[in-house]
Amino acid sequence: MTATEDTPLRAGFRWLASKRVTLGVVSLLLAVFGFELLVWLAYGVEGWQYFFLANLDPTPGWVMAPFAHRNPSHLLTTLVVIVVYGGLVETVLPDHRFLAFYVFAGYASTLAQLAAYLGGAPGLGTLGASGAALGLVALYVVRMGGRAIWAPATVTVVDGVFTGSGLVIVATVLANDFVPGVVFASGTAPLGHVGGLLAGVAGGVAVLLAERKSSPDPSLGT
């Protein structure tokens, strides 16, 4: 391989560099986390909870919770999923629709967990972009699963790898949240994750239907 030849790593970075909305979301989440640290230092844990935690009491947390994280590991794991599956979904959706879906999935996640608290579920509150991240995964998996049935010739091996990885991510999260004795991470928001996933399923179906309408001949699919 010569110096002028591309490498998978270089190609991957170039691909990611073209995903400006995904990178914008990542930058926003990093900026919010930095702001969280400043609030924590200035006002302590109670001030941090007031600004960033969504619970049944009306606070700024109702707005900020889908963009905030409780610690660096919480942020990092979410960012990894957003970078990969956000980039994949951004390839399919126009910028404004991608951003609208991401925000919708984030707030659908928060509202679902708040509904769980209203129904008597335990917990001090919810925050995090994991619901939105799972929404991206679900949208991609549903869209590619549908294409595998409708237009299998348009689905590549790489598509299959990311679809399979997405299914593993979803199964792992649901097992952690709902299967007794399975704990990969503690302190999660189970109904919040479900809310994000359902938003992603709805988004994936909508994308698939739009693609079928615009290209009824599978051989023309992209």
Image: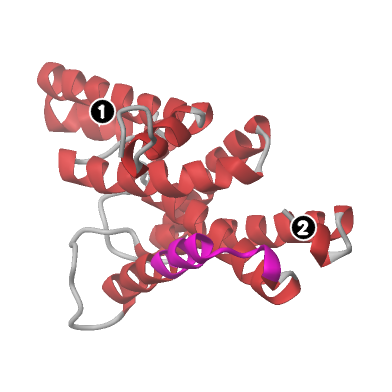
Farthest front residue? 2
Which mark, by number, is residue 131?
none
Does label 2 or label 1 sit earlier along the sequence? 1
In the rendered image, which residue does mark 2 sit on?
Answer: 221
Q: Is residue 44 visible?
A: yes
The residue range painted magenta reads 153-166
* Magenta stretch: helix, strand or loop mostly: helix
Q: Check contact, mark 2 vs mark 1: CB within 8 A.
A: no
Q: Is residue 7 above or below residue 203?
A: above
Q: How is the image coloured?
A: secondary structure
Q: Position of residue 209 (x, y in %)?
A: 79, 60
Circle 1 packing at 10 Å, graded few (<14), some (14-19), many (20+), is: many
Residue at image x 17%, y 45%? Answer: 73
Disc number lying in front (2 or 1): 2
Q: Position of residue 189 (x, y in %)?
A: 33, 59
- The Cα atoms of the two marked residues, 2 and 1, are separated by 40 Å
In the rendered image, which residue does mark 1 sit on?
Answer: 33
Q: Secondary structure at mark 1?
A: helix
Q: Quadrant of the image for the N terminus?
A: top left
Whether 155 is among the magenta residues is yes
Please indicate whether residue 45 sits to the left or right of residue 215 in the image: left
Please name the amino acid that badge 1 sits on: Phe
Residue at image x 18%, y 68%? Answer: 184
Q: Position of residue 19 (x, y in %)?
A: 51, 32
Whether 51 is among the magenta residues is no
Please indicate whether residue 204 sits to the left or right of residue 35 in the image: right
Q: Which image quadrant is residue 192 in?
A: bottom left
Please indicate whether residue 92 sits to the left or right of residue 140 in the image: right
Q: Secondary structure at mark 2?
A: loop
Q: Position of residue 16 (x, y in %)?
A: 44, 34
Q: Is residue 104 visible?
A: no
